[in-house]
Amino acid sequence: MTAFEFTAAPTRRRFSGSVIFAIVAIVTAATLARFNADSFYYGDLLAFFQPTLFVVSIIVLLVALVARHRVLAAFALVLVLVNGLPLFMPIERAAASAGGRELRVATSNVLGGRNDYEDLIAWSTKSGIDVLGQQEVSGYVLRYFDALRAHFPSAPPADLLGHYPEVMAWSGWRIVKAEHVQNVPYVVPDDGWGGNPLRLELVPPGTPDTASGSTLKPAVVVYVLHPTTPRSFDQWETRNLYLSTVARSVAAEPPGTPVVVLGDFNTPTWSPFFQSFLKKSGLVDAAGTGWPGTTRFSRRWFSKYFYFGSPVDHILVSRNIEVKHFEVGPDIGSDHFPVLADLRLP
């Protein structure tokens, strides 16, 4: 080793140590912010990128090990464990088995404002779906959905939906009651997407009316929702209050009522507000994993190679419902993948 090489080696080591230290500090700050996501707006936004924090932590750990910076490697290892825990923690599951009717449900954010819905309509009508929830549905968008009207015999009444429903539902099962959840804050269309959640009481097709004319007991209650995206602090607070209100409505259902809640929550699996929704409502995530596939993705960033985004479209079920199958659907022209689940009712 020459004199120059001898002096350059420690310099390179100090430089690499400084770079790794800086990255560790940034990831540590992001991790601490996420730990306070229930009260810190930017911390909750970081929950959208929980897998990214995990992957970056692994990369930093490997670099520190290769560069033989043991102390930094130890810090990086802690970050790997902390950021990986929410992804791999076991989650509560629905009933192991149930003996009632099977029901296929799906939810799809249609990306309102475009004019090409052929792929969306084809998937919606050819996938054997019994109940389909939609978001970002305007009166303009409804003009393209004649095929859905022909395929699904039941939908909420027009006077409930209005000219700009935003949250929409199509059903092969008979809707015996449709209403909006009361006292739910949402952003009007001029300020951003978001709509009043639907609550539907459903019975299987062919169910006869009661002799006395009284209301049929629902076989399942389905909620379809779409809180606003948290792109500002005010929208974040609105979204959180929206979710809390819907969770209380679900919790108030009569004991034993099979309940399904589906929609674009604009809230990732790892957000404390999503976890709070599960706890307050008593529901479980039909995905059955702490690391579901991406549902909301960017068509501008890396879309040719992989889908960069977060799971914000969810299907939740009461604990007495069996989840036979869950999947994230194909690209049907939106910036959201649809989500589908095969269920068996109690």
Image (cartoon, grey):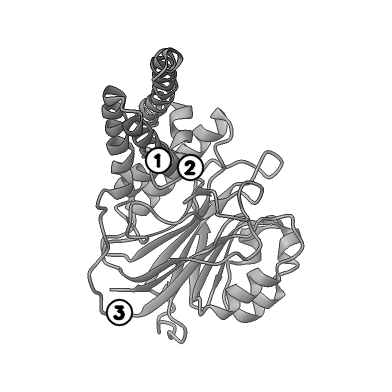
Mark 1 or 3: in front is 1
In the displayed structure, would residue 121 be above or below residue 253?
below
Viewer-nearest of discs 2 and 1: 1
Earlier in the chain: of badge 2 and badge 1, it is 2
- Number of marks: 3
Residue 177 locus on image (x, y percent): 49, 67
- Label 3 and label 2: CA atoms lie apart by 32 Å
Q: Which residue is mark 2?
A: 242
Q: Could you tell me residue 202's position as x and y percent?
A: 44, 72
Residue lying at the far front in this picture: please name it.
2
Q: Is residue 2 left or right of residue 190?
A: left
Q: Earlier in the sequence, mark 1 or mark 3?
A: 3
Q: Of 321 and 110, which appears nearest the observer?
A: 110
- The quarter in which the C terminus is drawn is bottom left
249 or 271: nearer the eye?
Answer: 271
Q: Secondary structure at mark 1?
A: loop
Can you identify the residue that label 1 sits on?
A: 271
Of 274 and 182, which appears nearest the observer?
274
- Residue drawn at point x = 47 percent, y = 41 percent: 48
Left/right placement of residue 227 relative to residue 300 reads left
Q: Amino acid at mark 2?
A: Tyr
Place of residue 64 in the rendered image (x, y in percent of width and height, measured from the top left): 35, 30
Relative to the observer, which residue lies in front, 300 or 337?
300
CA gap, disc 2 to disc 1? Answer: 15 Å
- Asked if one can make out residue 314 in the rendered structure from this viewpoint, the answer is yes
Look at mark 3 in the image and give the residue it sits on.
100
Indicate the secondary structure of the residue bearing disc 3: loop
Labels 3 and 2: the sequence-earlier one: 3
Q: Residue at x 48, y 34 (%)?
A: 45
